[in-house]
Amino acid sequence: MRNHAVNTNEFSFWYGNFQALKNLTFNISTSKITALIGPSGCGKSTFLKCLNRINERGGEVSHEGSIQVLGHDIYHPSVALPELRKQVGMVFQKPNPLPLTIYENVIFGARTHLKKVKNAELDMMVESALTRVGMWEDLKDKLNRPALGLSLEKQQRLCIARLLPLKPKLLLLDEPCSALDPAGIEAIEILTKDLKRDYSIIIVTHSMSQAKRVSDDTIFMYMGELIEMNKTTDLFNNPTEGRTAAYIEGRFG
Ligand SMILES: Nc1ncnc2c1ncn2[C@@H]1O[C@H](COP(=O)(O)OP(=O)(O)O)[C@@H](O)[C@H]1O
Ligand SMILES: [Mg+2]
């Protein structure tokens, strides 16, 4: 479907013999922010890592069912993983810039994935990506400084910026604020809401208040299953499942 960023259809996923995702069927809208909530270990990160297939880098994994990203079956044999990973960018809990300069971090993916990019184009990519995450004015004269010297919030912004030259369609944010102080959290939430203009976004969060502040839709998962998905306001105001109600009221998790 054209207005769906993601369609999953009876999708299950195993690490070896352990089934981490169970029969997931749901759609995620384009140009919205979808929050993924649920207790630790319920499969949130696993689901995100299925969307760009980075969980195939480790041990033995298998799946059943299908996932489409923007209408394309990502497990089809013709899928090129580097292309998929360009389209589906991911940011992790702990900011993980490379031990390189700010400039080299932003263009690292472009150097790896794109052929023959001219220096002037790289410069443009850096300006455009840092502008998009609200850091160009601050950093334009400091591009050769080490990225690891930035505050954690700015490192996380940089980790988002370095995805942008690859023109992603879907951004996956896996607890992107968990290492940040309240001011950093607010700044990243404002940025996330602004990025919705150009990207479909899925954010995993442990914070109910963050899910309420930033997301349009919310998915509640428990032990590998989708328990409930709804508009965020409806899910929090009128959960239809007892387990959703118990979780959002803080009775477990
Ligand atoms: N690489 C792995 N190998 C085996 N089991 C894993 C692996 N990664 C995660 N798991 C297991 O899969 C389940 C879901 O984990 P995860 O997706 O990280 O949950 P969440 O992000 O919701 O906390 C957990 O039981 C976890 O122990
Ligand atoms: Mg996780």
Image (spheres, grey):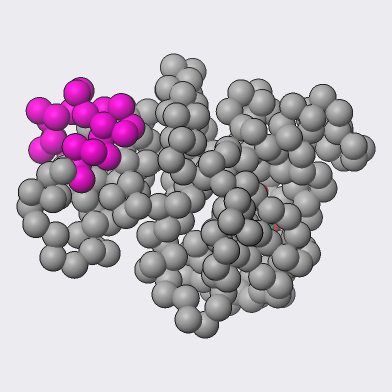
Q: Is residue 14 left or right of residue 234?
A: left
Foreground of the two, 250 or 204: 204
Quadrant of the rendering where the N terminus is positioned: bottom right
In the picture shown, does residue 118 fall above or below 63? above
Q: Confirm whether residue 98 shows in the render.
A: no
Q: Disc count in the image?
A: 0
- Identity of the residue drawn at 20% across and 59% down: 111
Decide whether residue 129 is among the magenta residues. yes
- Identity of the residue drawn at 19% across and 67% down: 115
Q: Quadrant of residue 106?
A: top left
Quadrant of the rendering where the C terminus is positioned: top right
Q: Is residue 36 left or right of residue 90?
A: right
Residue lying at the far bottom in this picture: please name it. Answer: 77
Residue lying at the far top in this picture: please name it. Answer: 183
Decide whether residue 221 is among the magenta residues. no
Q: Confirm whether residue 215 shows in the render.
A: yes
Q: Is residue 234 left or right of residue 96?
A: right
In the picture shown, does residue 93 fall above or below 26? above
Q: Position of residue 229 (x, y in %)?
A: 77, 43
Q: Is residue 195 left or right of residue 22?
A: left
- Identity of the residue drawn at 14% across and 60% down: 117
Magenta highlight range:
125-148
In the picture shown, does residue 55 fall above or below 99? below
Q: Position of residue 4 (x, y in %)?
A: 61, 53
- Identity of the residue drawn at 44% across and 17% down: 183
Foreground of the two, 21 or 73: 73
